[in-house]
Amino acid sequence: MIRLGIVGMGNLGRGVQRAIAQNPDTELVAIFSRRAQPEQASATPPTLSLAHMERYKGQIDVMLLCGGSATDLPEQSPAVAELFNTVDSFDTHARIPEHFARVDNAARQHGHLCLISAGWDPGLFSLMRLLGQSTLPQGADYTFWGRGVSQGHSDAIRRISGVADAKQYTIPIDEALAQVRSGAQPTLSTAQKHTRECYVVPEPGADLSRIEQEIKQMPNYFADYHTTVHFVSAEELQAHHSGMPHGGMVLRTGTTSPGTKQRMEFGLQLDSNPEFTASVLVAYARAVARMAQEGQTGARTVFDIAPSLLAPLSAQELRQHLL
Amino acid sequence: MIRLGIVGMGNLGRGVQRAIAQNPDTELVAIFSRRAQPEQASATPPTLSLAHMERYKGQIDVMLLCGGSATDLPEQSPAVAELFNTVDSFDTHARIPEHFARVDNAARQHGHLCLISAGWDPGLFSLMRLLGQSTLPQGADYTFWGRGVSQGHSDAIRRISGVADAKQYTIPIDEALAQVRSGAQPTLSTAQKHTRECYVVPEPGADLSRIEQEIKQMPNYFADYHTTVHFVSAEELQAHHSGMPHGGMVLRTGTTSPGTKQRMEFGLQLDSNPEFTASVLVAYARAVARMAQEGQTGARTVFDIAPSLLAPLSAQELRQHLL
């Protein structure tokens, strides 16, 4: 039985709790949350404040860090790496080398094994980019995201004055996808691959055309994209846009000899982004528990994990049933 | 530089030669073939008879075994494992455990590292089945093959009396694929997922309706399938059906909580099945060379290979550019 703990009880943390329930070889020992209430300490599993983590040393094989990449994980991942083996889903691509170095340092000094940036992107999509480049060295790869809710873009809209609430969908452009699939290897910016669709609940009396302009002109987030803005009521947002669907595709097209085209395609279509991410984290926690038991320490990424370690089956069963 | 050798110079072996040329960190040292001609021994690279293999001990890091699974590999893989690290593409699913055991035994006794059953199915498709089951434990997975040429089925038609030549395409059934994508988790036999399309060149004066009946009634190969038979001239077969396209899809659908559907999909569309398989073998040969250098011995499958070992980039480059 692999004994797991959860740090952070937002959407991802709740997803991890569900994923653990789906994996009979794992059990949830304790949850750690900034918002832990005293009466939750005696529940099964208990929810405790972060300060009580240390008391669980030796009772939790892997701690799943479910905080956000902006402020939580840069602090939590190296700190918890001093006490436990960990898995996080750090997804600020540009800061991964720095995050890796800090977690690696803490993990090595304290004899733990810590996997960073698990999930689907980074995570499974990263694996697909690697498989594509390694098996089709003469080619190009493309990542499309969506149709799905971008938390960062939704938040950016909510910060505009006069906006009560908002959801933003990132949507792949069919023509761009078709061009990629043809093997033409076009050069495409993120804006040439995606449109952005915004559902905005305005505050009473707000100037809608000013809000629309502010969204469409927002640098980095929207200015380069074909963006549509729909104003809706709070009820409509709740009824039709409260889910967290997401997904996307990684494609690699290449040639193995002149004119011989080969294409690899990986796609996810997810009703719940946090629940699927959580499911991936639990599979990687299984691998971390096994590798840590072998005495491995330091930081790792999905690139370092032999696939067999993710599955509950034995090597022999895998060869017999899945190979 | 990773020094490679090829055993067997059919379509797959020629594909490996092309793949090595696309990977600047690999070089082809020698080719071994039953049909080696004396004058080829002085070419660069030399083509030599199988009996000369032993002389290359210490000069080849990994030998790529490109024979067939029916008769070549069951003999060659354990035999060559006594002399070299190897990669093969053994694809008789039912006999994999036995093949693994024989190769493992030879490899351990002689201190070599040998990967069996690399390619795309078994190979990348196996990896996808494992990723799907590990990240969506409550779900079902499906493998579709095609549209592509099945060598085994083409050969079966050619053995019918009155048939001069033939090509058989395996074709996924769109309705079955749509049903799987819906998340309904249907139970589908291989015949419920695929149709079979046959292009047959008859011998002069042959009884076409007898040939068609013999094909359609052939047990295991065609009897359970919706099969169509087209009679064509040798010229037409050559002009339109001489390629070796293939591909397929692995899908996993599951739920992470009641009613929350998640879907993973991996697809290949290949102009040349042997060239892509060869490309995969060379990427795995890179991994085998690195693991052997660490002193690992015995048999392995794609499940045992950490993805980072497949890529020519360093771990740091991978984290920076692909994660």
Image: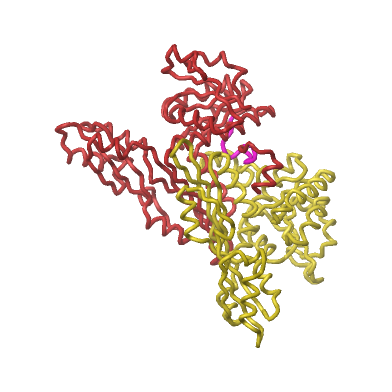
Chain colours: A red, B yellow
Query: In x, y percent, where is residue A109?
Result: 61, 21
Q: Residue at x 46, y 58 (%)?
A: A181
- Name the foreground residue: B109 vs A216: B109
Whether residue A308 is in magenta: the answer is yes
Q: Residue at x 67, y 66 (%)?
A: B219
Image quadrant where residue B16 sits = bottom right
- Name the foreground residue: A275 vs B210: B210
Q: Residue at x 56, y 77 (%)?
A: B230
B160 vs A258, left or right, is right
Observer able to see residue B244: yes
A306 vs A180, left or right, is right
Most distant residue in the top direction: A38
Most distant residue in the left direction: A205
Query: In x, y percent, where is residue A294?
Result: 69, 29
Above or below, A35 relative to A318: above
Observer able to see residue A94: no
Above or below, B232 relative to B251: below
Query: In x, y percent, where is residue B260?
Result: 44, 39
Image quadrant where residue A211 sits = top left
- Name the foreground residue: B203 vs A277: B203
Region of the chain picked out in magenta, as a range? A299-309
Image quadrant where residue A69 sits = top left
Whether residue A64 is in magenta: the answer is no
B282 vs A19, left or right, is right
Query: In x, y percent, where is residue B23?
Result: 62, 55
- Name the foreground residue: A226 vs B311: A226
